[in-house]
Every structure is written in C-alpha cells, then in structure tokens.
Image: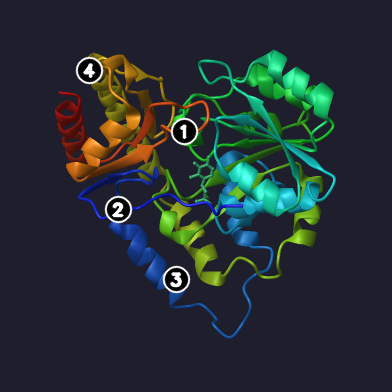
C-alpha cells in the first residue's frame, strides 16, 4: 500500500491543495492569543469539547449532541470508519473522488467497493441503486462538491441512498460554503434522517488548514458510538479555542467565500475562452482538461511548473486523463496562473 501524499514543490504560486489564499483576520489572531493565555496547561482539555460543539451547533441550527469534532475532517472520516467499518464491512466510493476515502477505509480494514461517476462526474441514481443492491455497503461516501471535479452531488441521489441503504451515508462538505446546496438541511427538525453524516472542515473556507480542525453533524445516537473509538482527549485545549474564536468571524468567512466565488467565475470564463474543457465548479478549485487544446495534461502541468506555478496534476488518476485542478488564489496569483497557462498552451 502506498501512503497518501500531495506533491509539493518550491514555487512562487502554489495553487495545488485547495487552501484559502488569505489568512484569517488579524482580529482573530489577537482574540485567539488573548484566550490562549488563560489555558490551564496542567489540565486535560474538555474531553467532549462542549463549548465548541455548542457554537458549531448554533451556526447550523442543530443540537450540540449532533456535533462531533476532531483533528481535521480526515479524523472524522477515520472515526466513522472505525465506528461502522472494520473487517468484514464494506465502504462504497464513487470514483473519481477524494482519495482519502479509500485510504482510510483500507487502513481500517474495510473492503472498498469502487462505484463510478457518469461522464460529467455525477453519481447516477441507477449506479447508486445498483451498488446498494449488490454490495450492501456499511458506509457510502459522497462528496459535495466533489474533489477534484468541483461538481455537487444531487439531493435526489443522497435521498435515494438514505432510503435504500441500511448503512450510513456520509456527505463530505469540505467545500460546502461555496456550494448552492447542503445536505445539512436533512439533519434538522422532526423528519431528520437517522443514517446521514455531513462532514465539514475549518481547513478551507475558514482559512485554518494549519489548525487541523474538522467536524461532522450526525444524528444524536451516533455520538456515543464515535466516543467509543476516538482516543481520550483527542482534541487539545488550544484547538478548541481556535475553533470557537474562528466562529466569531463568520461574516468575514462569508466575505472570503463571495470574493473567491467572483474569482471562480472569472477563471472559469478565461479557461473556457482558451478552449479547454472546464467543469462548472461549486468549490474553491476548478478542474479542466487540456486535450481540446491538443496538449497532454502532464505537459501543460510541467510548463506551468517551469514558470513557478504549481497546480494539481490529476492526469494520471483513473477516469481523469489529461485533467488538471487549480485552486483559486488571490486575484494576483490567479492572474499569474492565467498568464503562465496562456504561455503553456501557446
Ligand atoms: C480538503 C478536504 C478535506 C479536509 O480535510 P481536513 O482533514 O479537514 O483538512 C476533506 N474532504 C475533502 C473532500 C477535501 O478536499
């Protein structure tokens, strides 16, 4: 088995890992430092991260008992696999999608069923029905918007999965704030479903990839189950503070999302005008294929690197021949990227 890694190079413009291009506001940093001063370093942290869970629950209008917080949403995904997966259990993924689903499923001894997306990278209802009927997966991973394609999942398919599967359905919304659609609506109120888990992260829209903080919203009955498999005191005091302070700057987060949304429209249009095949994105990255310009993905990627611009090369991933994925940067970075790409395609 190979480890997961996202290749890094020392370049001027780094648009390869879907981080936010801006740090959180200066006021966040000072408020955070002020609170950290009061940490009781000799004591263990609040094991259940009660206050942080209350604050997260408040922004989503759910109950704190529905929120589980961990070290990045990757740890949330791992916790889900430890809880519901394991030897003799199966996990279904819809490829191409986020590679960590398979990685985490395998390291937690699950059998992986690789279902496929259609030519536009959507999950077809028929494929969902087929996989559930044939394989009875214990865990289904959906990703909305999907990484690396940027396309959202459809509500119809999510609802079908919830209805026909007796396993749990995970909708990874790492980029949820950029999208028109959220599955969180299904977890509120009287008709809330009992097998849906929606994951979110502070790594992207909250500009806090360095903090390693993520969470999920789930039916309340799952929380004690997650607590059984997670290590005691897994979430340190400093991280709990970072999360709580970050949430006070919700408006600033939304402003960044709006700003990046405008850049997304601009870059999508520019790429389309260059003659590339571009997928309409609802995330902070855009996937495109180079072959309509009669050039291979590897070649274009290398020509960008030669100009000190790093994007993600998906060309050799199954189902993504000659596809590249660019993360939205600042306007300045995006302009450098567009200039370099024009040069590469010339
Ligand atoms: C970036 C990303 C995550 C975030 O992982 P963290 O561990 O929270 O940093 C999760 N899912 C997808 C699809 C992602 O692209």
User: What residue is pinned by disc 4?
Assistant: 274
Looking at the rendered structure, which numbered label has been put on residue 189?
none
Q: Secondary structure at mark 1?
A: loop
Q: Secondary structure at mark 4?
A: loop
Q: Position of residue 240 (x, y in %)?
A: 54, 64
User: Reading the chain from its start, which is encountered first: label 4 or label 1?
Assistant: 1
Disc 1 crowd, CA 10 A, few/some/many (<14, 14-19, 20+)? many
User: Reading the chain from its start, which is encountered first: label 4 or label 3?
Assistant: 3
| Residue 326 seen in the figure | yes
Contact (CB < 8 A) between labels 4 and 1? Answer: no
Label 1 and label 3: CA atoms lie apart by 37 Å
User: What residue is pinned by disc 3?
Assistant: 35
Q: Secondary structure at mark 2?
A: loop
Which callout, 3 or 2, points to the residue nearer the camera?
Answer: 2
Contact (CB < 8 A) between labels 1 and 3? Answer: no
Label 3 and label 2: CA atoms lie apart by 36 Å
User: Reading the chain from its start, which is encountered first: label 3 or label 2?
Assistant: 2
Query: What's the residue at 82%, 50% (across, down)?
Result: 87
User: Reading the chain from its start, which is encountered first: label 1 or label 3?
Assistant: 3
Query: What's the residue at 82%, 24% (across, down)?
Result: 134
């Amino acid at each position: 088995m190979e480890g997961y890694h996202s290749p890094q190079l020392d370049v001027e413009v780094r648009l390869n890992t879907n981080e936010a291009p801006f740090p959180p506001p200066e006021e966040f940093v000072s408020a955070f430092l002020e609170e950290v001063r009061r940490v009781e370093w000799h004591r263990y942290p609040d094991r259940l991260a009660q206050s942080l869970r209350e604050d997260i629950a408040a922004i989503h209008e759910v109950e704190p008992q529905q929120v589980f917080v961990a070290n990045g949403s990757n740890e949330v995904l791992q916790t889900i696999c430890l809880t519901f997966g394991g030897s003799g259990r199966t996990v279904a993924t819809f490829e191409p999608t986020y590679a960590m689903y398979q990685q985490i499923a395998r390291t937690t001894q699950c059998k992986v069923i690789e279902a496929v997306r259609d030519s536009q990278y959507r999950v077809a209802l028929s494929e969902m029905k087929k996989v559930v009927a044939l394989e009875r997966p214990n865990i289904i991973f959906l990703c909305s918007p999907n990484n690396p394609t940027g396309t959202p999942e459809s509500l119809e398919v999510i609802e079908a999965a919830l209805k026909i599967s007796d396993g749990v359905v995970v909708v990874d919304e790492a980029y949820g704030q950029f999208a028109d659609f959220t599955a969180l609506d299904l977890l509120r109120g009287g008709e809330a479903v009992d097998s849906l888990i929606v994951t979110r992260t502070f790594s992207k829209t909250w500009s806090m990839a360095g903090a390693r903080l993520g969470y999920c919203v789930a039916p309340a009955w799952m929380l004690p189950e997650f607590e059984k498999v997670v290590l005691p005191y897994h979430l340190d005091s400093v991280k709990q503070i970072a999360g709580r302070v970050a949430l006070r700057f919700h408006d600033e987060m939304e402003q960044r999302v709006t700003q990046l949304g405008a850049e997304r429209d601009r870059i999508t249009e520019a790429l389309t005008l260059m003659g590339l095949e571009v997928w309409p994105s609802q995330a902070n990255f855009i996937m495109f294929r180079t072959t309509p310009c009669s050039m291979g993905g590897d070649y274009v990627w290398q020509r960008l690197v030669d100009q000190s611009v790093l994007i993600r090369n998906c060309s050799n991933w199954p189902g993504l021949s000659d596809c590249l994925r660019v993360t939205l940067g600042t306007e300045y970075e995006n302009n450098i990227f567009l200039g370099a790409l024009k040069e590469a395609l010339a």
